[in-house]
Structure formats: structure tokens, C-alpha cells
Image: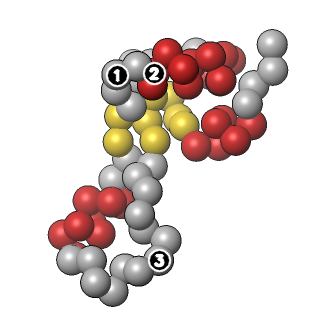
Amino acid sequence: MKTNRSAAKRFKVTGKGKLVHFRAGRSHLNRKKTAKRKRRLRQDKVLEGGYVKHVKRLVPYKF
């Protein structure tokens, strides 16, 4: 079974086995975004819902 390399670079697994991803929307057009919004975008987000099962299939050896 092969690992999807693009998915492996985008997702991390926490100590408890949850999937974490980086938030989108920080690369450009940042001038008009508030400082609060940009600060929130800096934080990682736990992946939830049906996406978890799909990503676990893409990166099988991270678990």
C-alpha cells in the first residue's frame, strides 16, 4: 500500500491519534484581513467528520 505523498505533507497525527491540518487562506490578500483573523489562521485545526476516514486511507502508515 502506497502513502499519498501530498497528503502526508499536509496532515500530522497528534499523540492521541487525531489528524491535524493547517488552515488555508494565509498566502496572499492578507492586507484586508484583520489581525485577529490572521492570528486564528496560524493555528492548526483538528480534522473532523467524514474526512478523517478518507485521510487515514491516504496516509496508512502514520497510525
x and y percentages locating residue 37 in the rendered image: 23, 67
- For the residues labelled 2 and 1, say whether their Cβ atoms are less than 8 Å apart: yes
Q: CA distance from mark 2 to mark 1?
A: 6 Å
Q: Quadrant of residue 9?
A: top right
User: Which residue matches tag 3?
Assistant: 28
The quarter of the image holding the C terminus is top right
- For the residues labelled 3 and 2, say whether their Cβ atoms are less than 8 Å apart: no
x and y percentages locating residue 49 in the rendered image: 34, 22
Camera-side residue: 19 or 6?
A: 6
The quarter of the image holding the N terminus is top right
Scheme of image coloration: secondary structure
Disc nearer the start of the sequence (3/2): 3
Asked whether residue 49 appears in the rendered view, the answer is: yes
Question: Amino acid type of disc 3?
Answer: His
Position of 34 relative to 40 (above/below): below
Question: Amino acid type of disc 1?
Answer: Gly
Q: Quadrant of residue 34?
A: bottom left
x and y percentages locating residue 22 in the rendered image: 45, 49
> At 45% from the left edge and 25% from the top edge, which residue is drawn?
51
In this image, 40 relative to 29: left or right?
left
Residue furthest to the right: 2
Disc nearer the start of the sequence (1/3): 3
> At 73% from the left edge and 30% from the top edge, which residue is drawn?
4
The tag on residue 49 is 1
User: Which residue matches tag 2?
Assistant: 52
Secondary structure under badge 2?
Answer: helix
Position of 20 relative to 25 (above/below): above
Q: CA distance from mark 1 to mark 3?
A: 28 Å
Q: Residues within 10 Å of mark 2 (few under 14, many from 20)?
A: some
Q: Residues within 10 Å of mark 1 (few under 14, many from 20)?
A: few
Camera-side residue: 20 or 57?
A: 57
